[in-house]
Structure formats: structure tokens, C-alpha cells
Amino acid sequence: MTEKTVLMGYAATVEAIIFASDKPVRERELRHHIPDEQDMVPIIEVIQQRFDASCGIELRQVGDGWAFRTRVEVAEQLNQHKQVERPLSRAALEVLAIIAYHQPITRAEIEEIRGISLSKGTMDILLELTWIKPRGRRRTPGRPLTWGTSPAFLDHFGLDDITDLPGLDELKSAGLLRKGQMLGALMDTPPTNQDYDADEQGDDLLDEKPMEEAMFEAGLSVNSDEEGADA
């Protein structure tokens, strides 16, 4: 048996040990599987030559150990960026429904309709989704800021215009009011626009991908333990 054959045999053993380990294998641990007189350097060189630049993985030294790792140039191609969507809380869905059916509407009016104070976090979520935007200020004392839906809202829910929102009868017939008449109450006597300053903000918001179902179907199926406060 030639010296090269023996060396290849040692290299195969070391390679298998490193490959089977879920963490870098220390060199002193590898030496337990080869004769004491055998130098480790040529064994490592044989393995590294086997996994050269044409391979997707390489043998790398990690501290005082060795491990197989994906080559950097290949790893960059394997990285995946996945957008994770989180369901809206019931509070956010209620506020979104109020804004959609009553826009332009002030924060105080939203709280009056809901009968509960509005947390800053709820509005932040809707703003982060780019589903709502400022619509100007009311010509009333304090000139409160009003809110309305954005083009991204229409795009996400597959609406051509805000007038395409389902009416009360449509929501009832679709079974979307099975948890009570909440949306029906939200849709009664919306504020008029006569006391509204139409200093519209820009519409260059981020596009959202279309929704696969009707607007509030997913919303009403969201469970929430928060009956009396915003999430």
C-alpha cells in the first residue's frame, strides 16, 4: 500500500468525522483517529483539495477546530428574504373600518364611535402598513387632524374606489356581522366633508399585494383577548 493511498484513507476518515459533526471538530479530537506519527497538515490539505473552488462547500478552520461551511459566494445566493405577515388585532381592524367608512375622521371621532380611547400603537400599525394617511384638518377649534384611507388600502383589498366598500346589507348577507352589529353602527351617520380642509398629502405610498378575500372577512375571524382596550 503506497504512502499516498494511506494518506487518502486517513483523509477520508477525518473528512467523515468533520462532516458528521454538528459543530467544529477540534484537531486534538481528530488525532484520536489517526496514528500519532502522522502529521495532520497533509491530511487537511488533501481534504481541502477535494473541496476546491469548484465545490459549494469548503473545509474551514474555526478556532482550534475544523468544519465544513458553505462558500461565501454561494451562501449569498441561498439567502431568502421572506415577508412575514402578522394578523391585525381586533382593535386595529375596528379602527380601520371606522376610518374607511367615515373618512375624513378625527382621532376624537374614532374614540367616540368605539367608546374607548385609541392607543398610539394601533394607529402606528395602520400607518406602517400605509393603509391610512392624514387627510387635512377640520375647520373646528383646535383644527384636529383627520384621517382617511390610502391608495395602498384600495390596492390591498382589491377596491377600485372607496365607494366599492361593501354596504350594510352586503355585509349582513355575507355573514360578516355574525358577531353583532358593530360594523352597522360604524356605518351610521358618517361625518360630512363640509368642515374639512382638503390639503391632501401625497399618494406615493408603497403598494401592497392584493387581498385574496373580501375586506373584513379575515378581520372578523381574528381572535383577540382584549375586549376593552387596544392592542
Image (spheres, rainbow, N blue to C red):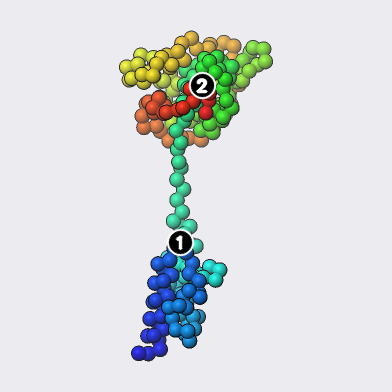
Q: 188 or 5: which is nearer to us?
A: 5
Which x, y percent locates residue 174?
33, 20
What residue sits right under mark 2 in the picture?
228
Farthest residue, direction left: 173
The total of numbered circles placed on residues is: 2
Q: Secondary structure at mark 2?
A: loop
Q: Position of residue 17 (x, y in %)?
A: 41, 71
Query: Residue at image x 61%, y 20%?
Result: 145
In this view, 118 is above or below 82: above
Location of the N terminus by quadrant is: bottom left
Q: Quadrant of residue 120?
A: top right
From the top left corner, tell me how far across and down residue 191 is, in percent.
Answer: 53, 12
**What kind of residue is marked 2?**
Gly
The residue located at (54%, 28%) in the rendering is 122
Q: Name the residue carrying label 1.
A: 74
Amino acid type at circle 1 is Val
Marks 2/1: CA–CA distance: 51 Å
**Label 1 residue SS:** helix
Using the image, determine if residue 210 lies above or below residue 115. below
* Residue lying at 46% horizontally and 15% vertically, measured from the top left: 186
Viewer-proximal residue, 36 or 143?
36
Furthest residue in direction right, as rendered: 142
Among numbered discs 2 and 1, the one appearing first in the sequence = 1
Residues tagged 2 and 1 counted as in contact (Cβ below 8 A): no
> Residue drawn 35% across and 14% down?
169
* Mark number displayed over residue 48: none
Are there few (<14), some (14-19), or many (20+) residues within 10 Å of tag 2? few
Dividing the picture into quadrants, the one containing residue 204 is: top right
